Image: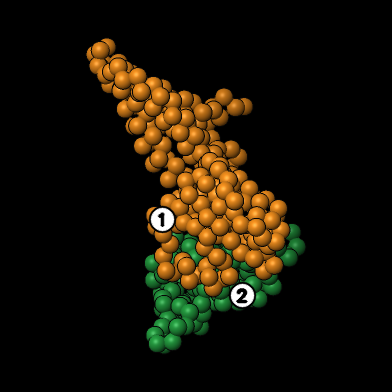
């Protein structure tokens, strides 16, 4: 997927959820909370998305303490933040234009 | 308890595993069509089948991910991964959006496509053996032929699922990919058939190649069926 193409809801929310270090299931829970249960991430979807985001360099593994048997956590990268910002601008434009619907014909 | 079944449709297979679990039999292992079951509280577990990256194993990453989500990895077989979760922990669905579903089924379909090609080659070899006088070739033809058709059917059905998902996403409008066009398989089959006819009548290869060509053409006709739709 291009930088310019819209993000799917799943990717949008996953990027948001790893703005701070977060691990697999923590991401699922935070996204469910943020969306009031509307967006649920199945483990297959989440696993595939995380692999893909990592390959694209939009998220990276965050290892704070390699000694303790802590769960593997992910963190958004600078590239990821840039992509997210582009998406935010796109959504902002959409929302702004949506107001036009209220105009009288 | 052991049960033997040959499934080519993972959704039907998943439904069956969950039916068994609802009756009080939890799947604990799988080997070449043999499913191992253990008695359990009826409905205690929900099963799902995933398609992985590694052959007969799962990555550490995957194992960690699943265990974290409370999902048990029961068995890996080929690229297939048998998973289960306690039903009390809620709904168990692997793929929750259209895009990841499409990716999942595409991987499955591509596996079936590759295996189909291998089966067609094996079938041709069996035909060649039979033509050359080895009677056992006819038995081989029958067995390989059945497997070949089963796998090809699985590839086609999986592709139908992908098309439906893409339609839902809005990628394809009203009907199949490219709607009314001639399938490349049909044209390839016709071409191969003509090429086979250039071979000498007595060549051992002519018959198997023609049979393969006919199979390809039949697949092509099925794929192009929308040409006849209104």
Q: Which chain is green?
A: A
Task: Left or right? Give the position of A50 relative to B127.
Answer: right
User: Quadrant location of residue A35?
Assistant: bottom right
- Mark 2: few/some/many CA within 10 Å (<14, 14-19, 20+): some
Give the percent coordinates (x, y) of residue A40: 63, 66
Q: Nearer the viewer, residue A32 or B21?
A: B21
Residue with the most extreme right position: A104
- Mark 1: few/some/many CA within 10 Å (<14, 14-19, 20+): few
What residue appears at the point 39 percent right and 27 percent down from the top-left corner?
Answer: B140
Give the percent coordinates (x, y) of residue B190: 38, 22
What residue appears at the point 57 percent right and 24 percent down from the top-left corner?
Answer: B228
Spatial CA distance of label 2 from label 1 is 31 Å
Q: Chain of mark 1?
A: B
Give the percent coordinates (x, y) of residue B36: 56, 52
Q: Nearer the viewer, residue B178 or B130?
A: B130
Labels 2 and 1 within one chain: no
Residue picked out by circle 1: B56
On the question of residue B59 being in view, the answer is: yes
Which of the labelled discs sits on residue B103, or is there none?
none
Residue picked out by circle 2: A29
What residue appears at the point 61 percent right and 57 percent down from the top-left corner?
Answer: B38
User: Quadrant location of residue B196?
Assistant: top left
* Chain B painted colour: orange
Give the percent coordinates (x, y) of residue B135: 35, 19
Helix, strand or loop under label 1: loop
Quadrant that contains the C terminus of chain B: top right
């Amino acid at each position: 997927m291009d930088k310019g193409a819209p993000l799917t809801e799943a990717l949008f929310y996953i990027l948001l959820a790893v703005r701070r270090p977060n691990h697999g299931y923590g991401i699922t829970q935070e996204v469910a909370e943020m969306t009031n249960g509307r967006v649920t991430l199945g483990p297959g979807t989440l696993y595939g998305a995380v692999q893909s985001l990592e390959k694209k360099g939009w998220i990276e593994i965050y290892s704070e303490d390699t000694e303790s048997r802590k769960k593997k956590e992910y963190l958004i990268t600078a590239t990821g933040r840039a992509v997210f910002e582009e998406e935010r601008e796109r959504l902002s434009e959409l929302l702004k234009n949506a107001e036009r619907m209220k105009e009288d014909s | 308890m052991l049960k033997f079944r040959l499934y080519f449709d993972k959704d039907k297979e998943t439904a069956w595993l969950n039916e068994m679990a609802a009756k009080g039999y939890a799947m604990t292992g799988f080997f070449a069509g043999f499913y191992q079951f253990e008695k359990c509280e009826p409905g205690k577990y929900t099963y799902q089948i995933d398609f992985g990256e590694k052959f007969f194993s799962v990555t550490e990453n995957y194992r960690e991910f699943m265990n974290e989500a409370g999902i048990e990895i029961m068995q890996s077989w080929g690229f297939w991964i048998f998973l289960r979760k306690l039903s009390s922990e809620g709904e168990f669905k692997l793929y929750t959006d259209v895009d990841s579903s499409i990716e999942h089924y595409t991987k499955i379909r591509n596996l079936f496509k590759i295996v189909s090609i291998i089966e067609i080659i094996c079938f041709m070899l069996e035909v060649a053996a039979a033509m050359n006088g080895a009677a056992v070739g006819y038995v081989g033809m029958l067995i390989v032929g059945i497997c070949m058709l089963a796998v090809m059917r699985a590839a086609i059905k999986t592709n139908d699922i992908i098309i439906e998902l893409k339609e839902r996403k809005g990628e394809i409008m009203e009907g199949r990919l490219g709607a009314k066009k001639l399938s490349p398989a049909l044209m390839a089959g016709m071409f191969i058939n003509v090429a086979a006819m250039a071979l000498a009548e007595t060549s051992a290869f002519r018959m198997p190649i023609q049979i393969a060509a006919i199979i390809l053409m039949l697949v092509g006709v099925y794929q192009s069926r929308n040409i006849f739709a209104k």
